[in-house]
Image: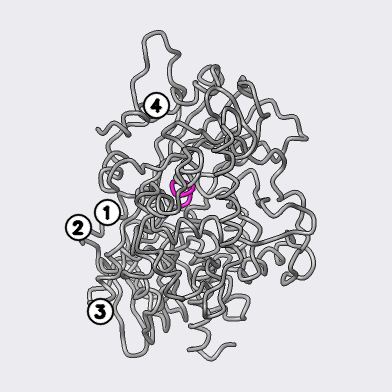
Amino acid sequence: MTVGAAALTGCAPAGKLPLPPGELLGMNQALGHRLREGIFPAPSETRKTGVLIVGGGISGLSAAWKLANSALEDFLVLEMENEAGGNSRAGRSPLVAYPWGAHYLPLPSLESVHVRELLAELGVLQGDPHAARPTYDERYLCATPQERIFRNGLWDDGLLPQRGIDAAEREQQKQFHERMLGFKNARGRDGLRAFAIPMALSSRDPEWLALDRISFAQWLTDNNFTAPTVRWLANYACRDDYGSAYDQVSAWAGLHYFACRSGEAANASADSVLTAPEGNAWLARGLAKKAGDRVMTGALVWRIEERKSGVAVNALFGEKTVRLEARQLIWAAPAFVLPHVWSEIPGDLKAASLAGDYAPWLTANLHLADLPEERHGAPAAWDNVFYDSPGLGYVSATHQLIRRHLSGTVLTYYRALHDVAPSEGRRLLLETPREAWAEGILAELERVHPDIRKLTTRLDVFRFGHAMRRPIPGAIFHGQRERLARFENPHITLAHADLSGFSLFEEAQYRGVLAAERVLSRTGFH
């Protein structure tokens, strides 16, 4: 075990309270790994559908949402897990719902048209979805305080520490902030925003694309950003959104984090986010509602055959294989799986599908009988970030319900395994017992909340072996990603955040809607 991994896991010291009960959860790797064995029963049943969507994460649900809204009802969604939603799934306790993964949505920019349309459909965006500064339902605007950071034994407001920072470092923080504001408004010679979301709408000016060739850490050095807190913020951003350290992330991707979002609201500040106790599960449910009972879970697709008039797909349900024949297939599962199920995949697409690596992630939900003891400084917030710690911090599921005066809470802890190679991180996720993860997490949180071990009644750990495609230097505009995005086939269309090179709600939804629009065009729907 590496030093970084050892910092998270451990054994209970003598005299410590026993660990709370819980489960070791995660994506169904046992089912997914059956693709390596390749041993499946022959089809015992055949069904037909117009459009088959493989993958019930945000991309697949967005494709279904678009098809349904366009009056194309003849489709099915296949999802390997026991419920749809991908990284936006949630759990529920008798007290409150809580996220397993993605937990917020920034105010959508004008370019994020489909996000705004969804929010309007759900009644969260009120009025014209194309307005520059729409009004949002206050129940989904993150309650204040939104975030705080723990450093040197004290809490500070916001994400950039201010206590104990000298004038020179404060000046560099200001310069970094101003530089990012400048990038928000920057445009290339083609007239497009340098950093837009969806990323496909960004400028293709070579001057901006050149940033993809170096790491974000290198860009900071080249631009004389040496202050520890500034570099920490940049590294935190990359760990948070990309599951990787800033010296492993493309400078273009690193800057995109800070500069892509320009959404505003009539009733909230521009840095506000939309959230709910269950994280982004409400968005996944909103998308899935249009698909209804056409979402089929527990379905492992293990073979794709392209035919003259469409595709034939073999899917395992339990121990039974069903053959599904469709005129169109939307592949909304991770790209790396496609070569394992499509034996006739074109060589260039196979290379592009296998070219990227994926960041391993860990989350944990701690069920607390009461609110934990607080250190001095800023008051409890929704997002509670750790400055010098292996984890990213935690969000509080009951923060949005603050007026209800609940006695307990659920804290969702986040950790990107960025300090080991991705393959080593996946091995750790597979082989490390829950007790070791739980001990490490409690030891880390005890530095912040001394009584948290005593208050925790349950601690569940959730593993994401392939949480997100990593935007390493060169991967966005100088590698194989664009081959995925440009792939054309009369019967098979790709739809996943992998086509953008990193995993964000806006990107996943855009890729799903775009795939659905291509299918609608082919089938004569408009």
Q: Position of residue 48 (x, y in %)?
A: 42, 79
Helix, strand, or loop for circle 2? helix
| Distance between the alpha carbons at the discs numbered 1 and 4 | 28 Å
**Helix or strand or loop: what does disc 3 sit on?**
loop
Quarter of image, res 485: bottom left
Q: Which residues are magenta?
A: 237-241
Disc 1 or 4, which lies upstream in sequence? 1
2 or 3: tag closer to the N-terminus: 2
Q: Which residue lies most toward the top here? A: 15
Report the mark closest to the observer, 1 or 3.
3
The question of residue 436 being in magenta is answered with no
Q: Residues within 10 Å of mark 1 (few under 14, many from 20)?
A: few
User: How many residues crowd around disc 3 within 10 Å: few (fewer than 14), some, or many (20 or more)?
Assistant: few
Residue wearing tag 2: 37
For marks 4 and 3 on the same chain, the one whose residue lies earlier in the sequence: 3
The image quadrant of residue 207 is bottom left
On residue 346, the disc is: 3
Q: CA distance from mark 2 to mark 4?
A: 34 Å
Q: Secondary structure at mark 4?
A: helix
Judging by the rendered image, the residue that carries numbered circle 1 is 33
Image coordinates for residue 270, horizontal then vertical, percent? 69, 55
Mark nearer the viewer, 2 or 4: 4
* Residue at the (19%, 57%) spot, across then down: 37
Amino acid type at circle 1 is His
- Tell me, yes or no, whether the two marked residues, 1 and 2, touch with CB atoms within 8 Å: yes
Residue receiving disc 4: 440
Image coords of residue 402 (percent x, y): 73, 35
Is the residue marked by circle 4 packed among few (<14), some (14-19), or many (20+) residues within 10 Å? Answer: many
Q: Is 134 placed above or below 88 here?
A: below
Which three-letter amino acid code belongs to the residue tagged 3?
A: Pro
Front-most of 23 and 319? 23
